[in-house]
Image: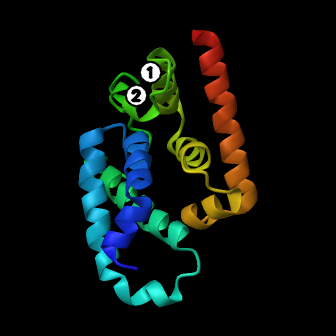
Amino acid sequence: MTPEEIYDRYGEKMYHYLALRLGSLEDAEDVLQETFCRLARYSVRWALVRSPRAFVFKILRNEANRFLRRKIGAPRMDILDPDRELETAPILAGPDNRIAALLSRGLALLPDEQRETVILKVYQGFSFKEIARVCSLSVNTAGSRYRYGIDKLRAFLEGKL
């Protein structure tokens, strides 16, 4: 698969994942560019890939994690500021921008592991099996992180609406 094919097939979803995960449209663009550079180096491996979407998102996730570690200088990942997260509200936009802003804030409040799982499940349409493959987790752990994240989002939204 060429970088052009990857971009055509997954580019928009990759960008949305990064924007929601990193909380910044600018950071999402930078990490997306780094991801495509890394994917270009993996051209030899494509013959061995069973699930192209999961492979692409695993590389994308790894690049996002590298970026976050560089940004904060430590392995801790919970760095999003709920007010800054509002920058990603356009990614969540629908008929009611107020709900998009609340969702954006709510996602920023989640621990990174739960936020990532919710993003992959809800906004990318991944199955728990695919999430487990992308995040190197068991299927049960992926499901638990999702449920905990959704419960926290629900509690946040119920308190705000």
Q: Residue furthest right?
A: 140
Labels 1 & 2 near each other (Cβ < 8 A)? yes
Dot 1: few (<14), some (14–19), or many (≥20) neighbours within 10 Å?
Answer: many
What amino acid type should be assigned to the residue bearing mark 1? Ala
The residue at the point 56 percent across, 50 percent down is: 120
Q: Quadrant of residue 54?
A: bottom right
Residue 38 vs residue 89, the one in the foreground: 89
The residue at the point 44 percent across, 28 percent down is: 93
Q: Position of residue 135 (x, y in %)?
A: 56, 61
In this rendering, position of residue 68 left or right of residue 97: left
Element on which disc 1 rests: helix
Residue 68 vs residue 63, the one in the foreground: 63
Q: Position of residue 129 (x, y in %)?
A: 69, 63
Tag shown at residue 89: 2
What amino acid type should be assigned to the residue bearing mark 2? Ala
Residue 115 vs residue 25, the one in the foreground: 25
Tag shown at residue 101: 1
In this rendering, position of residue 79 left or right of residue 103: left
Q: Quadrant of the N terminus?
A: bottom left
Q: Position of residue 132 (x, y in %)?
A: 64, 62
Residue 127 vertical placement versus 48 (above, below): above
Q: Work out how far the residue at label 1 is from the one at label 2, CA to CA, in angstroms.
A: 5 Å
The residue at the point 37 percent across, 71 percent down is: 5
Q: Quadrant of residue 128?
A: bottom right
Tag shown at residue 146: none
Element on which disc 2 rests: helix
The residue at the point 34 percent across, 59 percent down is: 66
In terms of sequence position, does the residue under pointer 1 or pointer 2 come before the other?
A: 2
Q: Quadrant of the C terminus?
A: top right
Dot 2: few (<14), some (14–19), or many (≥20) neighbours within 10 Å?
Answer: many
